[in-house]
Amino acid sequence: MLSKSRENSKGFKTRQTPYTKSNIVSLGKSTITIGTTKYKDTNGGFLLEDKPEEDNKEPVIEDPLVDLERPECEICNKPFVKSWLFEKFDYKCCDSCKETQEYKLITKTEAKQKYLLQDCDLDKREPLLKFIKQKNPHNVRWGDMKLYLEYQVEKRALEIWECLERIEEEKEIREEKKSLAKAKKYHKQLKELKMSMRSSLYDRTTSTKHIHEFGPEKYNEEDDTYTRSCVTCPYSETFEKM
């Protein structure tokens, strides 16, 4: 039982108990708070300090991550705990090996042009390739760019084309078709231009007034008249001289 004694101003000792009015902060239904300590009334003539249950709980110690649960780097074959490439692109490469190797990022447009891939190859074909978004450096008002890990993009292209040589061959074929299409379009436009020029020239020549160029006059004895004809057209005229 908690009790203390102290002398008052007259020299008499007074008995201090948890029930002393000056020490009681608040009274609950079954608890009494004295200062910062809470006591529980046992209804048996004494008080017990009321401690939170969580103080009695034993701390839970998590088991350390064993090597078998850690991903293994594909370069050095060592397990790692944290990796930027693994976090962003799900590529198993530790940060130490990342510094020694050159891992380039490539935009979606460049990936499609360089490796002849389609949108479905990047966005829908399993497993999906992860990417990060970045503001467009050419214009911030344009949409964010999707940046892929080029190593993974090239690997995806090999799944489709089997080898890089086939990609280069296909590029040459497409470039040749593109050149033929350009040449065909050029000749068509040139032909249309020539037709337009001819039509314009014809309109100008027909709309200009013709000036006759007459040849020598011919005298007609029967009716005493003269006739002359244009040397550039079938026109002829007959007239009399006074």
Image (spheres, grey):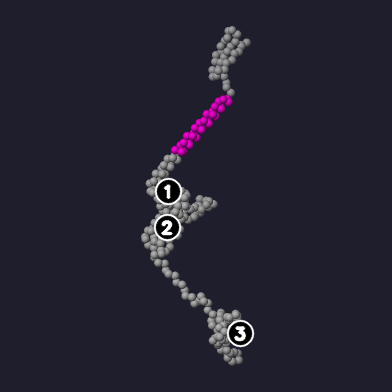
Where disc 2 sits, the SS reads: loop
Please identify the residue farthest to the front as the structure is shown.
43
Where disc 1 sits, the SS reads: helix
Residue at (37, 62) in percent of width and height: 78
Q: Give the quarter of the figure containing the N terminus.
A: bottom right
Please identify the residue farthest to the right as the structure is shown.
242
Foreground pick, 193 / 220:
193
Residue denoted by label 1: 115
* Res 3 seen here: yes
Query: Which segment is the magenta one?
Result: 180-208
Residue denoted by label 2: 91
Q: Amino acid at mark 2?
A: Tyr
Where disc 3 sits, the SS reads: loop
Q: Main secondary structure of the magenta part?
A: helix
Residue at (40, 50) in percent of width and height: 158
Residue 137 position (above or below residue 182):
below
Q: Amino acid at mark 3?
A: Lys
Residue denoted by label 3: 21
* Sequence order check, earlier mark of 3 and 2: 3
| Residue count near mark 1 (Cα–Cα under 10 Å), binned few <14, some 14–19, many ≥20 | some
Would you identify the image quadrant in which residue 98 lies?
A: bottom left
